[in-house]
Image (cartoon, coloured by chain):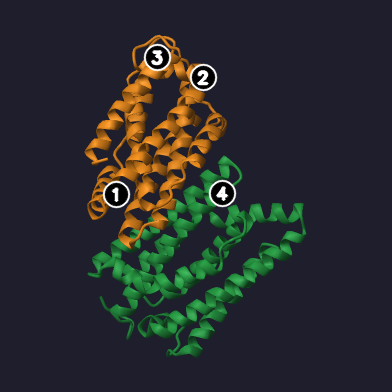
Chain colours: A green, B orange
Amino acid sequence: MTGTDGGVGGDGLTDLFGLLAYAELVAFFNLSADAALAPTLEDKAALGGMAVAEFGHFRALHGELTRMGAVPEQAMQPFVAPLNAFHARTAPADWLEGLVKAYVGDGIAADFYRAVAEVLEPDARALVKEVLADTGHADFVTARVRAATEADPTVAGRLALWARRLVGEALAQAHLVAAERPPLAHLVVGAAGASGGQGDIGRMFADLIDAHDRRMAALGL
Amino acid sequence: MTGTDGGVGGDGLTDLFGLLAYAELVAFFNLSADAALAPTLEDKAALGGMAVAEFGHFRALHGELTRMGAVPEQAMQPFVAPLNAFHARTAPADWLEGLVKAYVGDGIAADFYRAVAEVLEPDARALVKEVLADTGHADFVTARVRAATEADPTVAGRLALWARRLVGEALAQAHLVAAERPPLAHLVVGAAGASGGQGDIGRMFADLIDAHDRRMAALGL
């Protein structure tokens, strides 16, 4: 499968879907674990439902990889170590940190998918937009974080620091991945209309962080 | 909602569905956690899919409780402590113990559902049979346990002891629940055609354990 949009090769797309598939699978595991720790049965059920939605995204990407002639597990493999490293270095200390982590990750992932979708073929674009579909997570998190910071204003400072650390760790891993996977980097910066290279990657990430900062402000952090 | 089968009151049914709903929710959490620990991406995906199937069962029971006019979280509440106690006392030490626990639990739950379904109204019976639907778990576990015991025969003895402990802990909690929830106990022993009481409960459990022993033998344990 080759992109119609000049230089977007199959390798880049296999990498992209492999990355997204593993990211969704891990999001499912993390959200399930958050759900198990939720303080009420209502929250357990609500977060469990969001976890299941992430698994649906994983399944869609897994199916598309198979359809493209790739072996999904092989396509995911290069991203297992960097994503695991990110998650190992950002294990939430409590339920609120878990919520903020899921919210930060969801928001950046959605912006990233949206940007990348622009350079994909129609079929691949439709899949990425499906995976982008709202899981209802943002509203859930916003309500609970606001309630927690209203009850104890010192929580806001701690969560804001936490969100900053998450973004730093994510950027570190993302730069390593971009350096190791040129076809993926090329595909991704194509989304930003640039020619490629670490500078373009950096500019694309900078745009994602601007959007992230706006979401944090909306959350009161 | 009142049963048509003489004395099967709404309280018993609300209890039954509350118990099953919470059991399925916890099964979802446990299977997701097992999936996260699975040694390969293929196994992670396969177990994740089974976890999602359990969540679907939870959703169906949750929806039925709402339809019956119950508050699902209230209906589940009496069973949170005993089920949590069971799981806290039977935390698997490794991936194989997790698989055997899920297999033992699934098998006993399926036999229990099948027995109880007989005394329910057609609507409730259809739901219980839907929840009973095979998640593909048994084949998955059987293949992996057999491979592990062939590679290291001493594993079989350890897993057999583990399965025995699981059943003991489950029976202890089940007897406590039966003692505290007479309408539920009455509904459940109605399934076995008995009049009620701890002796009938004990006989019903004994039948479940006979079936469990046959499954363990089939697993080579």
Q: In front of the other: label 1 or label 3?
A: 1
C-alpha distance separating marks 1 and 2: 39 Å
Q: Which residue is mark 1?
A: B154
Q: Are marks 3 and 4 in contact (CB under 8 Å)?
A: no
Measured Cα–Cα span from mark 4 to mark 1: 35 Å
Residue at position x 35%, y 51% in the image: B47
Query: Could you give the CA–CA distance between mark 4 and mark 2, rounded to whole angstroms?
Result: 29 Å
The disc labelled 2 sits on which kind of residue? Answer: Ala
N-terminal of the pair, mark 1 or mark 3, is 1
Mark on residue A63? none
Q: Nearer the viewer, residue B69 or B182?
A: B182
Residue at image mark 3: B200
Pointer 4 residue: A37
Distance (Cα) linking label 1 and label 3? 38 Å
Say whether disc 3 or disc 2 marks the residue closer to the N-terminus. Answer: 2
Q: Position of residue B40 (x, y in %)?
A: 33, 62
- Judged by depth in the image, the label closer to the viewer, 3 or 4, is 3
Left or right of B83 in this view: B49: left
Disc 4 element? helix
Which residue sits at x=45%, y=88%?
A194
Classify A111 as above or below B188: below
Label 3's element?
helix
Compute the Cα span from label 3 to label 2. 12 Å
The amino acid beneath tag 1 is Thr
**Along the horizontal axis of the image, is B168 left or right of B137?**
right
Place of residue A138 in the rendered image (x, y in percent of width and height, measured from the top left): 57, 58
Q: Tell me if label 4 and label 2 are in contact, CB under 8 Å.
A: no
Above-or-below relation of B187 to A6: above
Disc number at residue B179? Answer: 2
